Amino acid sequence: MLMKIFPFLGWFRNYSLGALRIDAISGLTVALVLIPQSMAYAQLAGLPAYYGLYASFLPPMIASLFGSSRQLATGPVAVVSLMTSASLEPLATAGSEGYIVYAILLALMVGLFQFALGLLRLGLVVNFLSHPVVNGFTNAAALIIASSQLSKMFGVYVDKAHHHYETIWRVILAAFHYTHWPTLLMGALAFAIMYGLKRISPKFPNVLAAVAITTIISWATGFDHNVHVDLSAINSPDAREAVINFNRVVTTLPALAEERTRAGKELEKAKKTGRQESILKAKHHLDMVAIKIEQLKFDTHIFRKEIREFLFKGVEQEDGTLKFYLPEDMPANA
């Protein structure tokens, strides 16, 4: 009985050092590919990248203990990440604290639903889905997932639009003006490694090699060169004003997201009373908050676009600090 509940207890009977060595190599291989992949999936779901590490660690470990399989991979999935983002974006701002809470709650509810389906042997329900529907869904998801990574490939950041094609158009415009060439070269190198190794030796783990090589290069070259400076170090009143406006809008969005949640609860309460006046009033409040959020998102896009148009050059001061000037405002002795 205990073996049925905890099947992994039976592994230790015939376990050997040879099996341990193979498992260690397999675990290392999966980890090297799964870690960057899961971080990308977390961003696709609208979550901070490090949440992908949690999803890549716990689910595979637990699933391998209770239902190991040579054919089934367990962990973050691109389609689920995409559907998570599509489901939660109307409720909260992506990446916010409320959004993360909703994502955790959604994962718990989906897990309970899947557990119930398995317990009741209802997997046969999938057989009622026609192949054209499944193929259309997976192909569309593949196109959206692949195209959503274009901004990472060019090293640019854009705000999401209402439609995916509009977001891609924003990426193209941003890439035309602000492509980060080291990022693009790193991505091209990864593609070249995968394509070249697949042509030379199809059995060689080309994805693993691309991840390992680019990771080592990033570490050796100090690829991440983010610099945090005080606003006073920017010698441009227009740029400082744009940053202040951007920060004001960004800090206002979480409060409005919470207000939208409260407005949604008020609408549900009003529906239970059945009074049309209360329902219309609550719905009007919810719609007004939603309009404000959309306007602020648009303002965020405009301010971010304005900020990205500023190109600065750093000039070292006598005290060793850097002051940033626009090219036309550079001091004569710089």
Image (tube, grey):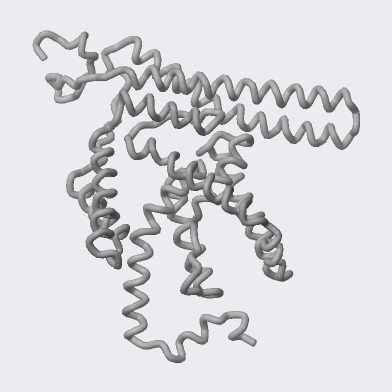
Residue visible at 40% across and 53% down in the picture: 37
Q: Camera-side residue: 166 or 239? A: 166
Residue visible at 30% across and 60% down in the picture: 208
Q: How many marks?
A: 0
Identify the image quadrant of residue 231. top left
Q: Residue furthest right?
A: 274
Q: Residue furthest front?
A: 132
Q: Is residue 205 above or below residue 78?
A: below
Residue 199 lies, in percent from the top left, at: 25, 59
Q: Is residue 198 above or below residue 227?
A: below
Q: Camera-side residue: 160 or 331? A: 160
Residue 159 lies, in percent from the top left, at: 47, 29
Left or right: residue 258 compared with residue 239: right
Residue 253 lies, in percent from the top left, at: 55, 27
Left or right: residue 328 compared with residue 169: left
Q: Is residue 95 above or below residue 321?
A: below
Residue visible at 24% across and 37% down in the picture: 225
Residue 297 lies, in percent from the top left, at: 53, 24
Q: Residue furthest left?
A: 333
Q: Quadrant of the C terminus?
A: top left
Identify the image quadrant of residue 302. top left
Left or right: residue 53 compared with residue 1: left
Q: Is residue 145 above or below residue 155?
A: below
Residue visible at 52% across and 21% down in the picture: 298
Q: Camera-side residue: 240 or 271? A: 271
